[in-house]
Image (tube, rainbow, N blue to C red):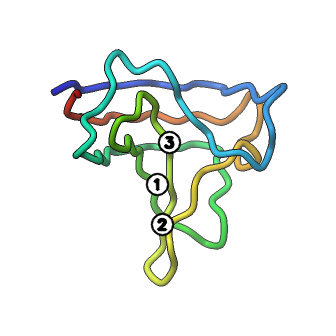
Amino acid sequence: QVTVTCRLVNIVTTGMTAGSPLFIRGLPFVSSGSNNSVGVALPAVVAFQSSRTAMVSIIGGTDSWVVFQTYKADASPTFVDIGDLTSGASDIHFTITYITA
């Protein structure tokens, strides 16, 4: 079991594709194939799509990266895309615990 805490401050998106999901790569270990993990995420200056109100961090099975999804009660979750960030101003702080492979 591994816990990761990260502060992404003033994220610069230069050279990234606006419609692509935001991935944080380089986790210390690959996650277990039978486990999906959900952690907390605190965004600042992140544009939530379609009136979503909550954001979480996610590590899927056999992944070594974190993605972020936003939610609202009556709709499917959406990924946080590069275009949802304001380059040089957006921040995301997150903590997630996952089981290693």
Task: Examine the image and state in which quarter residue 98 appears.
Answer: top left
C-alpha distance separating marks 1 and 2 = 6 Å
Q: Residues within 10 Å of mark 2 (few under 14, many from 20)?
A: some
Q: Nearer the viewer, residue 36 or 101?
A: 101
Q: Which residue is mark 2?
A: 71
Give the label on residue 92, or none. none
Amino acid type of disc 1?
Met
Q: Is residue 21 left or right of residue 18?
A: left
Element type where label 3 sits in the image: strand
Going from the N terminus, do you reach mark 1 or mark 3 first?
A: 1
Element type where label 2 sits in the image: strand
Going from the N terminus, do you reach mark 1 or mark 2 first?
A: 1
Q: Relative to residue 82, is residue 79 depicted above or below?
A: below
Residue 56 pos. (x, y %): 41, 51
Q: Residues within 10 Å of mark 3 (few under 14, many from 20)?
A: some
Q: Which residue is mark 3?
A: 67
Q: Are marks 1 and 2 in contact (CB under 8 Å)?
A: yes
